[in-house]
Image: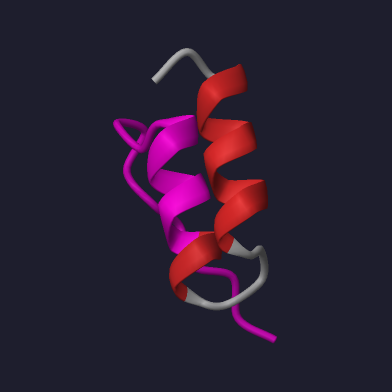
Amino acid sequence: MQKHHSPPSRTPLDILKERFARGEIDKDEFEERRHVLGE
């Protein structure tokens, strides 16, 4: 399995949005985690 190296400018919110887009988390979890991040 190849690992993808991403630029260091990727924020926790970027990662959260990616997980939501992939369907790993649902809307409620996305909103809750975004709130925890202070966004």
* Main secondary structure of the magenta stretch: loop
Q: Is residue 27 left or right of residue 13?
A: right
Placement of 32 over or under 26, stated as above or below: above
Residue at left offset 62%, top offset 34%: 33
Residue at left offset 58%, top offset 77%: 23
Residue 25: x percent and y percent?
66, 63
Residue at left offset 55%, top offset 59%: 27
**Between 9 and 30, which is closer to the camera in this rendering?**
30
Residue with the most extreme top position: 38
Residue 36: x percent and y percent?
62, 19
Placement of 11 over or under 1, stated as above or below: above
Tell me the quarter of the picture where residue 18 sits.
Answer: bottom left
- Quadrant for the C terminus in the image: top left
Q: Is residue 3 left or right of residue 21?
A: right
- Quadrant for the N terminus in the image: bottom right
Does 5 appear in magenta? yes
Residue at left offset 51%, top offset 63%: 20
What residue range appears in magenta? Answer: 1-18
